[in-house]
């Protein structure tokens, strides 16, 4: 991936827009962790049950079965290890780090070895074709995966004129799906929930960075 050292006027506008976004999203304590598998086979985690293929992994004060147990300790460890890479890539591509963190959390829960049954891999759950398109030779390498996924996200933001909701919908369902529905979020429950979840996490991150 080629590192960006200059911004065009349009990219500057997009950067300021992303940094200043404010979403009105209800905040709540995380007492439970649910696991959701989307139609691509991607794995997502949420603190609230929603419609679809969700499964409770962890609840405060409750023991879960050994199969599919969510390890909060491992989650925190992974987050601490990959966060410097996320922040660095965000800076290089002029993306809000809170947005990149939100996507990584929803896509893989910060697990660089995450893989779906459909073949999406790594922190940003890159499909092999997308990884190849962006020069990612090893999707399980955190830095390669992040740079490939973040560059793809930046291209989607440019394509949809920095409309963050459309860019996220395209990241989840593919840019052709968004174009097919007239540059609207496709009417796929999984994609609609994905956009809401990432925006929710982005708002949490953004507010945390202000404090």
Image (spheres, grey):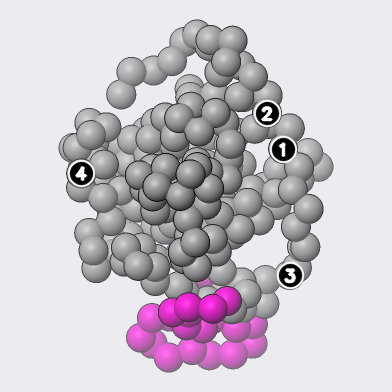
Q: Which residue is mark 3?
A: 29
Q: Could one spot residue 49 in this view of the protein?
A: yes
From what the image shows, is residue 205 above or below residue 16? Answer: below
Q: Is residue 85 visible?
A: no
Give the CA separation, mark 2 to mark 4: 30 Å
Q: Are marks 2 and 1 in contact (CB under 8 Å)?
A: yes
Left or right: where 97 falls relative to 44 = right
x, y percentage for residue 87? 53, 34
Looking at the figure, which quarter contains the N terminus?
Answer: top left
Residues at marks 4 and 1, CA–CA distance in whole angstroms: 31 Å
> Crowding near pointer 2: few (<14 within 10 Å), some, many (20+)?
some
Looking at the image, residue 32 lies above or below residue 136: below
Across and down, in percent, residue 107 comes to 44, 57
Q: Which numbered disc flags the more N-terminal residue, 2 or 3?
A: 2
Q: Quadrant of the C terminus?
A: top right
Of helix, strand and loop, which one carries label 1? loop
Marks 3/4 in contact by CB < 8 Å: the verdict is no
Q: Nearer the viewer, mark 2 or mark 3?
A: 2
Which residue is tagged 1? 21
Secondary structure of the residue carrying tag 4 is helix
- Is 168 placed left or right of 120 in the picture? right
Write down the region rendered in magenta. Answer: 50-75
Q: Which residue corresponds to the image point at 32% horizontal and 41% vertical from the top-left?
A: 145
> What residue does disc 2 label?
17
């Amino acid at each position: 991936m080629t590192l960006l050292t200059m911004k065009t006027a349009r990219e500057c506008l997009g950067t300021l827009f992303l940094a200043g976004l404010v979403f009105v999203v209800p905040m709540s304590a995380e007492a439970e962790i649910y696991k959701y598998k989307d139609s691509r086979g991607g794995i997502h985690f949420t603190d609230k049950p929603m419609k679809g293929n969700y499964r409770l992994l962890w609840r405060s004060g409750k023991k879960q079965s050994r199969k599919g147990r969510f390890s909060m300790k491992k989650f925190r460890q992974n987050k601490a290890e990959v966060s410097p890479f996320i922040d660095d890539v965000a800076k290089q591509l002029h993306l809000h780090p809170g947005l990149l963190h939100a996507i990584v959390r929803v896509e893989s829960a910060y697990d660089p070895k995450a893989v779906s049954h459909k073949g999406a891999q790594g922190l940003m759950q890159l499909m092999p074709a997308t990884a190849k398109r962006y020069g990612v030779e090893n999707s399980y390498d955190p830095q390669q995966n992040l740079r490939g996924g973040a560059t793809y996200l930046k291209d989607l933001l440019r394509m949809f004129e920095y409309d963050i909701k459309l860019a996220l919908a395209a990241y989840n369902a593919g840019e052709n799906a968004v174009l097919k529905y007239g540059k609207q979020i496709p009417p796929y429950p999984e994609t609609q929930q994905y956009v809401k979840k990432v925006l929710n996490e982005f708002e949490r991150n953004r507010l945390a960075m202000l404090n």
